[in-house]
Image (cartoon, helix red, strand yellow):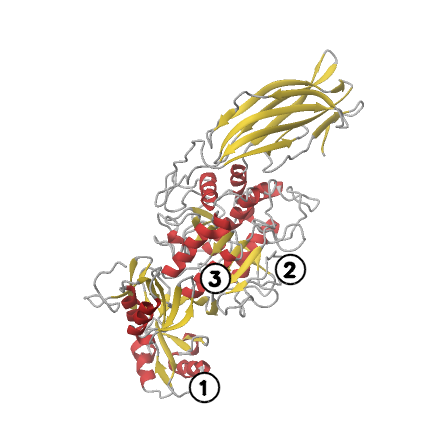
Amino acid sequence: MASDGTRGGARADGQRSYWAAGERVELTPSSALVAVREAPGEERGTAAVAERMAGVAGAERVITLPDRGLVLVRADGGAATATRSTEGILEAVEHDEHVAGGPTVFETASAPGVYLVPDGEVIVKFRQGADDGAVQSVLARHGAAVVRTDHPEPGALLVQVDDDSTVDAANALHDEELVEYAEPNFVQITRPPGPAVQVLDSVPAPARPVDDMSALVRTDGGTRDGGLADPGFASQWGLTKIRAPEAWGISTGSSAISVAVIDEGNDVTHEDISYRLPGFDAYDGDNDPTPAGSDAHGTACAGIVSMRKGNGKGGVGVAPSSPVLPVRIAKGIGGGNWDTDNAKVANGIRTAVDRGADVLSNSYRLAPSTAVTNALQYAATNGRGGLGCVMAAATGNDDVSGVDFPARLSPSIRGLLAVGASNEWDQRKSKTSLDGENWWGSNWGPEVDLVAPGVHVYTTDITGAAGYSGGNYVTDFNGTSSATPHVAGVAALVLSVDPQLRGWEVEDILKLTARDLGTPGRDQFTGFGRVDARAALEAASRLWCEVTARVEFISGKAFMRVDARLFNPGINTVRVDSFTLRSLTADGTSEVDRFEYRPTTGDILLPRSGQEVRFNQLLLRANGTPQAWSYRWAASWTYTFWRPTGPGFPLNAGTASLDAAMAGTRGQGEGGSGDGSSGSAPAAQDGVATADGEAVRQTGRRTITITID
């Protein structure tokens, strides 16, 4: 293990630190929080300690962590009352026989706003093949007692040390030759990157740009996508912005593709969310991910992914047919803050992968952690039977240059996407953007991959009085927390179209099909742009056929004049092996005419090259005369495809270099489609998709009626 020659977590200049994912993370004692606990021999619990500290600093400044046996007191160095300063609080503790000082609370520039409490636990993993006797000798030398084995990952040990020397012990173990890594299992007091609701009720919502919502909501109560109207749908500007309703024409998701919402728990009884159960509670170590109290953040994220479509309740999720696998990693402790630790988060991620999650939605921020990094890498390499999970992670809400962990890992882990927030005007959400929420903004930096809607988001709330709104839904969820499940939902749609896509292929598709915003090309503010669900699903389909037909009369007889093209909007290389277009009798039972294309070697369509196979001005016999006519057609095709040989976006690089060579996994497919006058359809992924179209004109009518069977 690499070492800088220092021990005990302190450099020669006195700066304390710990190791995470091979890098030194510097620590600074917090001037904002002081940890206290019961004095030895006391048996009244943390509630009594909290009451005593409320008398010192004020009840609003006391955070109770009963599961940890700790009470955190928020200091105020500028307060008029001296006892509210860090020094004043510590002095009050020293003179109170019922209360004792707790471990030093740390902060780090690597995770602004996250407070780290070293509570006597260290995660240590020895190198593979280390002799058990030698392992025990190392642990004994550092006073480490094993609490749990193979946790939070196989081969890792959760060990107990004296809480006053947690950081020292972790660094000393890190320096051992037999140790692969060691890190303090910090209690992390963090705030998820959304919702940013500090002054939500005092700022009027600005007028929003006009989207094509009128084209989606019909006057008869239905929707253009064919689903029943859900009352909240008209408020979901984000769905229209990312073209989700258009994507639903291809897929609404699949019950076989699930999204793990890794958060503070989910209301699994909610009327409008599809769940895959059992869930998992990494905080308490059981299979009940029900949130505590009003911990509604996870339920809101879950609704963005998978509110049911067409049930007449609430709104619609991005992938309404894909269930949510709820995973609880944290507990709310008031003021929008969470209590969690490295092992709980890593265990939650790994369990989601092991239980078959296809996509992971991560709307939280932490201080850097080797265990969490390893868990996300495990999802990328072992998830989905080795194909790799797709992961979306929030960039943060501080409106600064600096992407939160774990989103900042996106350049180094395949399939992990760092997601920022955009608004109705396709701006990066900032304190000065047009949406009116002037108290927060989406973090930026070179790690940003995509942006998605992150303001004024309609979604689910905890059922009943708990949660954000006192109802079953909330209308103004926000933050990069809300942008992240939008991207996770689109990833689920993509995998529903092609479940065999590797995680990095989904990443490539989402980046390549994003709607570019701001400065042309990838930039540090919006990455590759705003996620585009329809374009992503078109790219996930291996071959598309577009047919335009019209009636034409020659010598008093009806014909069809047809233009057709086959094209490849995706990341595969595709060879067109055949194309057949047939005209049919009005009832569709018999063939009238046929066009067949059977190339000797097939036409190669390179990925995203604009190459196509066109058939212009085809003429096929139809039915009837100018006085009474009809036409009906059906098209079918076969193709061979080659998956990419490797990712188009190299790790730690932001430019595309898709390999168009025909190599790697090969497959074949067939497809068929029909539409009365014009239309397009993807090739079926497996088997043959069949449909046909009909256009009829009858004597005495002034209009042409078109029906689709």
Asked if the residues shown at circle 2 and circle 1 are in contact, with their CB atoms under 8 angstroms apart, the answer is no
Quadrant of the image containing the N terminus: bottom left
Specify the label residue 387 is tagged with.
Answer: none
Which amino acid type is shown beneath numbered disc 2? Glu
- Residue indicated by mark 3: 348
Q: Considering only vertical position in the picture, is 529 above or below 75?
A: above
Q: Nearer the viewer, residue 392 or 481?
A: 392
Q: In what element is the residue under mark 3?
A: helix
Q: Nearer the viewer, residue 274 or 666?
A: 666
Which amino acid type is shown beneath numbered disc 3? Gly
- Residue indicated by mark 1: 44
Q: What residue is shown at x 26% (from left), y 58% (from top)?
A: 2
Q: Is residue 211 left or right of residue 126?
A: right
Q: Considering only vertical position in the picture, is 52 above or below 356?
A: below
Specify the label residue 271 is tagged with.
Answer: 2
Q: In what element is the residue under mark 2?
A: loop
Q: In what element is the residue under mark 1?
A: loop
Percent position (x, y) of residue 10? 24, 67
Q: What residue is shown at x 30% (from left), y 63% (from top)?
A: 178
Q: CA distance from mark 2 to mark 1?
A: 41 Å
